[in-house]
Image (cartoon, rainbow, N blue to C red):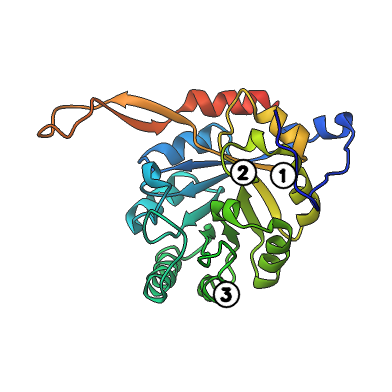
Amino acid sequence: MSATPPDGLRPEPQPAAALSGTLSGTFVEICLEDVGGARVAAEGGANALEVCAGLADGGTTPTLGFVRHCASHAPGLDIRVLVRVRPGDFVHSEEEVDVMAADIEAVRAALPGPVRLGFVVGTLRPDGNVDVDAVRRLVSACGGAPVSFHKAFDSVPDKVAALELLGGLGVTRVLTSGGAGPAVDHLPVLAELVRRGGDDVRIAVGGGVRPGNVVQVVEETGAREVHLRAPGSVVSRGVSAGYDQGSRSITSADVVAQVMAALGR
């Protein structure tokens, strides 16, 4: 059951028929960390990639080599690079912001030309509100490339105010579940954020989005973009001194295909 939205987040009803017509136009972003996953997502019809490392820890900044690999194997897709210096909380020191700004500049220098490059950042103060100075600096480092604010947004206490604030800082997209836990627990909140963000700050719904619920998520929130992993696994080859757990995670062509089929694509 969807959570009851807090005061100020009461969505206006939207006709089901109007929403159902948006399914096939839903923009699909696949989050990945596996070499080869970019090709799988592109061949499956995805529109964008979020390129990451360390997804078991919530995601961290990928290597330049991996970013180049994804860009070269998914031509024409938006390549959004996660910039997160470490796992754990989203409260970053000045030195950590320095490193993230330098990482952004290094990616921009490494990917000249026609790549549709964007960045995904997120920095908070200890009280859970947006760290304005840090975000302003990171947006500046992006040099005009589109900037998304990642799921650190789920921890912000006043999401409506934060949405407006981020728009003023130059953020054009927010990735969110609408709160702690999966997106399906916060559909009314997400619907209101989609309405308020409009075209200025697009809401990408992520967090537990899967083939079996993607239609519900889109229809009940009006979101035009969804974000998800498409997880599969393969048996590892060989042994590695006890560190090999027998399998590893990859981007699954079957899961991508199921999502696209559910959306009528």
Q: Position of residue 229 (x, y in %)?
A: 50, 36
CA gap between label 3 and label 1 equals 25 Å
Tell me the amino acid under the disc marked 1.
Leu
Say if residue 209 shows up in the picture: yes
- The answer to whether the residues at label 3 and label 2 have Cβ atoms under 8 Å apart is no
Q: Nearer the viewer, residue 73 or 150?
A: 150
Compared to residue 237, the image places residue 119 above or below, namely: below
Compared to residue 59, the image places residue 161 above or below, namely: below
Tell me the amino acid under the disc marked 2.
Ser
Q: Nearer the viewer, residue 8 or 142?
A: 8
Q: Nearer the viewer, residue 160 or 106?
A: 160
User: Quick one: quadrant of the N terminus?
Assistant: top right
Tell me the quarter of the picture where residue 103 sits. bottom left
Q: Which residue is mark 1?
A: 190
Q: Determine the residue positioned at 57% across, 66% down.
A: 145
Q: Determine the residue positioned at 64% across, 26% down.
A: 213
Q: Decide: few, some or many residues near mark 2? Use Cα within 10 Å; few <14, some 14-19, many ≥20.
A: many
